Amino acid sequence: MEHMIYIQNAAEVITMKNHTDRPARKEAMDELNIIKNGSVLIADGKIVAVGLDEDLQETYLDQINEATVIDARNKIVTPGLIDPHTHIVHAGTRENEYAMRLQGKSYMEIMNAGGGIHATTRATQSASFEQLYEETKVRMDTFLKNGVTTIEAKSGYGLTTEHEMKQLEVAKKLDEDHPLDLISTFMGAHAVPMDYKDDPETFVDLVMEEMIPEIAKRNLATFNDVFCERGVFTPAQSKRILQAGKEYGLIPKIHADEIEPYGGAEIAAEVGAISADHLLKASDEGIQAMAEQDVMGVLLPGTAFFLMAEFANARKMIDSGVPVALSTDFNPGSSPTISLQFIMNLGCLQMGMTPAEVLTATTINAAHAIGVADTIGSLEVGKNADVTIFNVPNHLVLSYQYGMNHVDTVIKSGRVVVENGLLYG
Ligand code: NIG
Ligand code: FE
């Protein structure tokens, strides 16, 4: 065996076990399966043992003697955090729009006037592959330093076949080159380009007949996402685009009921989406349908915070049996943050979730939201050794002391990638 690591004597090892087959829901979201004075043995990129330090010392003494030991006293150990909804591959920033919104302009007004997603689309279309790669890589480093070991990444700032592919090719190359794992979603239906403003159906056809087949043929994405919102894509158009993706093996996701109630949650249940995201304005019927069809609700409280909007009703969703995950929605317009730790704090203070529920929502349930719970999301024997060590004495402090980065160490696939809060090597 090589590359053995022994994380020793953590105040809390938060295992999140027993939810690999099905996401945690209802009361189970509040159960972390904590081992106090816990240790984790890692070898060859996998988790070999998790348990009480004294038990592991007895059974694995030879391996422990050969391993690199990380002292985790007074710290907590969690599965590497997972962010299941980001728009990380893009060029530039939009602080000018932030200033406009502070003066009273709304997000949709700015977008309809050719700013918003259109502004980032222009910047992304003009950017070379190398420029996009470099900008995105810096952001991935920041995710890693903040304890996140896997993210989902959407296209949707290309809006032509050529530029959508460029975005997804950048994501693919970065997934290969960077320790952070990146799982791609095609989102050609992120906005109706200004050129198609008077003829959105032609753009919908382009997405369905040209983009989806090409992206699928090149194996550039796992998921297919649509911005279903008044003034963007209608419920009927969204449904057609998601069904078209399914025919090419792309699993549906949907930006649903973000600004207005628009039937997005219902569509998610109808097309068998793996998740419906945002849901600030989701209807009771939509929530019920999601619970019945096992659709993950991916909630993005950073977006509600930044758009100064009402938060999603996480409590109602969890209590109705919808499995819930949390994400940053990292993007330059509606949520320019990469801090999942801050998102956890918002989950508690603004959406009534418990500190345990927000951890479930950023580990095992987040893994389910992007279809990777068989390999990550919990600290269980045989899973990939993606582990974050936080410099807090218990899991409550993680979301209590907010607006700061508590990360001490990050291990990705069995290798230390962040040490003392800094990128390793
Ligand atoms: O999830 N709602 C649509 N898409 C993003 C925002 C993208 C942008 O403003 O650049 C979101 O909020
Ligand atoms: Fe989004």
Image: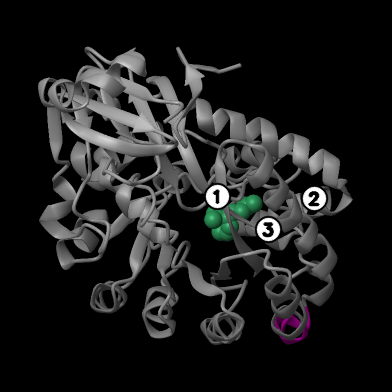
Circle 2 is placed at which residue position? 124
Circle 1 is placed at which residue position? 86
Q: Is mark 3 within 8 Å of ligand 1?
A: yes
Q: Is label 1 in a helix, a strand or a loop? A: loop
Question: With 399 as the anchor, is 190 left or right in this view?
Answer: right
Give the label, 1 or 3, closer to the camera.
Answer: 1
Q: Quadrant of residue 260?
A: bottom left
Magenta region's main secondary structure? helix
Q: Which region is colored magenta?
A: 198-204
Question: Residue 402: in sight, yes or no?
Answer: no
Question: With 420 as the anchor, is 196 left or right in this view?
Answer: right
Residue 202: in magenta span: yes
| Front one among 106 and 305 | 305
Residue 255: in magenta span: no
Question: Residue 419: in sight, yes or no?
Answer: yes
Query: Which numbered disc, 1 or 3, marks the residue that appears first in the sequence?
Result: 1
Label 1 is placed on what type of residue?
Thr
* Cα distance between the residues tagged 2 and 1: 16 Å
| Front one among 95 and 175 | 175
Q: Are marks 1 and 3 in contact (CB under 8 Å)?
A: no
Q: Are marks 3 and 2 in contact (CB under 8 Å)?
A: no
Q: Is mark 1 within 8 Å of ligand 2?
A: yes
| Front one among 79 and 314 | 79
Q: Alpha-carbon neighbours of circle 3 within 10 Å: few (<14), some, or many (≥20)?
A: some
Q: Are marks 2 and 1 in contact (CB under 8 Å)?
A: no
Residue at (84, 65) in percent of width and height: 162
Q: Quadrant of the N terminus?
A: top left
* Cα distance between the residues tagged 1 and 3: 19 Å
Give the label, 3 or 2, closer to the camera.
Answer: 2
